[in-house]
Image: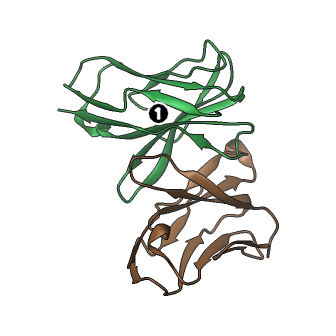
Chain colours: A green, B brown
Amino acid sequence: EAQVTQNPRYLITVTGKKLTVTCSQNMNHEYMSWYRQDPGLGLRQIYYSMNVEVTDKGDVPEGYKVSRKEKRNFPLILESPSPNQTSLYFCASSLFLSGEQYFGPGTRLTVT
Amino acid sequence: TQLLEQSPQFLSIQEGENLTVYCNSSSVFSSLQWYRQEPGEGPVLLVTVVTGGEVKKLKRLTFQFGDARKDSSLHITAAQPGDTGLYLCAGSSVGGTSYGKLTFGQGTILTVHP
C-alpha cells in the first residue's frame, strides 16, 4: 500500500529538548516536504527536498532542520524546541514539486 | 509568497443544503488543487484544475478554476454528513523564485448536520 508514515503521532516535550520526527514514503517520490498546520493559518511549508542531499527552505524554516540521506526518509529535527513550535506537523511526498501531495497522518507536537 | 484567501472559514449547514467555498488570490496560479482533511488524518487530494475556466465534477462536488487562474470555487450540492471536514485549496506558483511551489489557503471547516 502506497503511504507516508510519520512517527511519533503525538509528542509532548519541554523547551530546549532536541527532538526528531521521522517521515518515510514507499512511493519512490523525488519530492518530500514538511508542513505545519495551525488554526486559521492553513498549511505552511517548513522545508522541502527535491532529491537525496538536496533541500531548501519553505515559508517558515526558522527553528527547524531537515536531512535527506535516503530517498524514502525525510526527518524533521527541532534542535531546541520552543512553545511557538507547538503545532500539527505533516510530512508529504509528491512526484513533482507542485504535484499531488501524499500526506502522512500527522504528528501533534506540544512544547511546554 | 503568493497568498490564497479561502472563504468562509467556517460553514455549518443542514443535510441537503447546497454550499460554495471560495479560494481567491491576486496572483496567477498555473494550477490549483483542492484537498479534504478529516480529523486525525492528513489532507487527501480531491481534484486538480489546470486550465482557466475549467470545470470538474466529482459526484456532488463541482470545482471551477477562474478564467484568469486567480481564483477557484468548490460547490457541493445536497450536502451530506459525510461531507463534513476541512477543505483546503492549494495553488502552484507560476514564476520567480517560488516557481512550482504550492501555497495553501487557510481552509474551510464544513459541518453538515443530519
At a point 33% along the width and 19% down the height, the residue shown is A19
Q: Give the left or right position of residue A97, taking residue A10 as reference.
A: right
Q: Give the left or right position of residue B80, taking residue A102 as reference.
A: left
Position of the C terminus of chain A by quadrant: top left
In the picture of the structure, the residue carrying the numbered disc 1 is A61
> Is residue B53 visible in this depiction of the protein?
yes
> Is residue B1 visible in this depiction of the protein?
no
At a point 67% along the width and 19% down the height, the residue shown is A71
Percent across and percent down for residue A6 are: 46, 29
**Can you tell which quarter of the image residue B113 is in?**
bottom left
Q: Give the left or right position of residue A56, taking residue A46 as reference.
A: right
Q: Is mark 1 on a helix, strand or loop?
A: loop
At a point 63% along the width and 77% down the height, the residue shown is B60
**Can you tell which quarter of the image residue A29 is in?**
top right
Going by the numbered disc 1, the residue's amino acid type is Pro
Task: Say which of A40 and A5 sits in front.
Answer: A5
At a point 75% along the width and 53% down the height, the residue shown is B94
Percent across and percent down for residue A18 are: 30, 17
Position of the N terminus of chain A by quadrant: top right
Percent across and percent down for residue A3 are: 60, 34
Q: Give the left or right position of residue B93, taking residue B82 as reference.
A: right
Task: Say which of B69 and B96 sits in front.
Answer: B69
> Which chain is home to disc 1?
A
